[in-house]
Structure formats: C-alpha cells, structure tokens
Amino acid sequence: MKKTGVIGIVLKVGRERVEKVQSLLSDYGDIIVGRMGIPDKTTGINTISLIVNGDTEKISALCGKLGRIEEVNVKSALISVETD
C-alpha cells in the first residue's frame, strides 16, 4: 500500500551538507510530488518541506538517509492511500 505525507527537513547551511541532501532528494525524486525550500540567511538554517507518495520502505529509507547526515533533522507524517 502506498503512503502519502509530508517530510520536514531542517538543516544548518554548509556546502557539503546541502549537496548531500540535494543528492538524496534527486535519488528519490520518483516519490517526491512537491518541494518547497526556505533559506534563512540570518540564522544559517534551511527548511525544506516535501510532499511524498510512495511505498513505506522507500519513504523510510529517504528519511533514514537524510537523518544520518550531521546537523540535519527530519520528521515525517504519513497516511495510507488506496490506489487503483
């Protein structure tokens, strides 16, 4: 069964960190329906919201890989969706 939901990502600015996050988001682009990123230059914190639709395993893998990057925090909220 597919899941639809939101993934919130908060990370400190840093070229290597941002590149790792961007690379992962590109790798999982097939489950990302929408994305919004807000950089806060005054605090050096970036916030990214993702709308996702996919298998639980793939969504969990993305969250897990993101969460293993230093100074990246990830939270998700998912619901089950019946598809035809």
Image (tube, rainbow, N blue to C red):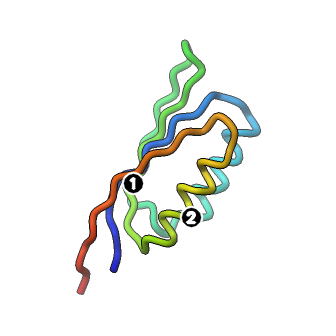
Asked which secondary structure carries label 2, the reply is helix
Q: Vertically, is 52 above or below 84?
A: above
Residue 59 % position (x, y): 48, 64
Q: Residue at x 51, y 21 (%)?
A: 40
Question: What is the quadrant of residue 44 in the picture?
Answer: top right
Q: Read off the residue under disc 2.
A: 61
Q: Vertically, is 10 above or below 31?
A: above
Q: Vertically, is 72 above or below 41?
A: below
First in sequence: mark 2 vs mark 1 = 1
Asked which secondary structure carries label 1, the reply is strand
Please rate how many residues cluster around mark 2, counting C-alpha atoms within 10 Å: few if below 14, some from 14 to 19, many from 20.
Answer: few
Question: What is the quadrant of residue 15 in the picture?
Answer: top right
Q: 22 or 8, which is in the foreground?
A: 8
Apparent side of residue 46 relative to residue 50 in the rendered image (left or right):
right
Q: Residue at x 43, y 74 (%)?
A: 55
Q: Residue furthest right?
A: 16
Apparent side of residue 21 relative to residue 81 in the rendered image (left or right):
right
Q: Vertically, is 53 above or below 5?
A: below
Nearer to us of marks 2 and 1 is: 2
Q: Residue at x 34, y 53 (%)?
A: 77
Split into 4 quadrants, where in the image is the C terminus?
Answer: bottom left
Three-letter code, disc 1? Gly
Residue 45 % position (x, y): 56, 25
Residue 39 % position (x, y): 52, 27
Residue 34 - label? 1
Split into 4 quadrants, where in the image is the N terminus?
Answer: bottom left
Three-letter code, disc 2? Ala
